[in-house]
Amino acid sequence: MKKILSKAFTADQDIEKLIGYLLRYGVITASLIVFIGGLIYLHQYQHNGVPAYHTFVGEQAGYTTISEIFSGVGSFNAKGIIQLGVLVLIATPILRIFFSLIGFILEKDRLYILITFVVLSVMLFSIFGGLKV
């Protein structure tokens, strides 16, 4: 078994495998969370009947902040659990870019460090720039 901080571990293929596993398990985890939330949603709202589709009734704004999502998960609310799955799905490619940045730092490839840092900065700014606290 390779040591985590050894040069053999930080080889190109190992970082690519790590990123591949991250993407695969991130999507699988997000899918399972949303699926479990969907099952809980069906159980919680099974007796509501068929909605009247001839009139539009909008949903209230909820679960738009991270604290609301975690409080919904803590209270075992189906909508909060589904939103957590969506949050995990959104975080997956961001973590991929972050680990790519770490890989390029370990390889000391300055051009790709700069490009990856700019891409990560733009993504984080676009996500957290309009976030309600």
Image (cartoon, helix red, strand yellow):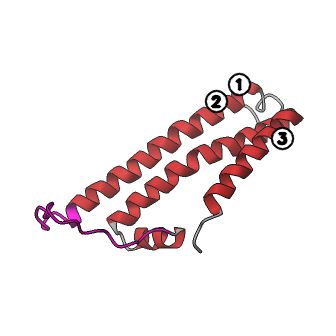
Q: Inspect the image, locate mark 3, and give the three-letter code of the amino acid beneath it.
A: Leu
Towards the viewer: 95 or 121 = 121
Q: Is residue 108 visible?
A: no
Q: In terms of depth relative to the viewer, which is nearer, 124 or 91?
A: 124
Q: Quadrant of residue 118?
A: top right
Query: Which residue is depicted at the point 81% across and 34% down?
Result: 112
Place residue 47 in its image quadrant.
Answer: bottom left
Contact (Cβ within 8 Å) of mark 3 with mark 1 = no
Our reading of the magenta stretch's main secondary structure is loop
Image coordinates of residue 49 in percent, x first then y, are: 10, 64
Residue that badge 3 annotates: 114
**In this picture, residue 85 sits left or right of residue 133:** left
Among all residues in the image, which is located at the extreme top?
Answer: 13
- Residue 5 placement (x, y as % from top left): 81, 39
**Helix, strand or loop for disc 3:** helix
User: Tag 2's secondary structure?
Assistant: helix
Residues in magenta, as a range: 43-64
- Contact between marks 2 and 1 (CB within 8 A): the answer is yes
Q: Quadrant of the C terminus?
A: bottom right
Q: Which residue is mark 2?
A: 17
Three-letter residue code for mark 1: Gln
Q: Earlier in the sequence, mark 2 or mark 3?
A: 2
Question: Residue under circle 1?
Answer: 13
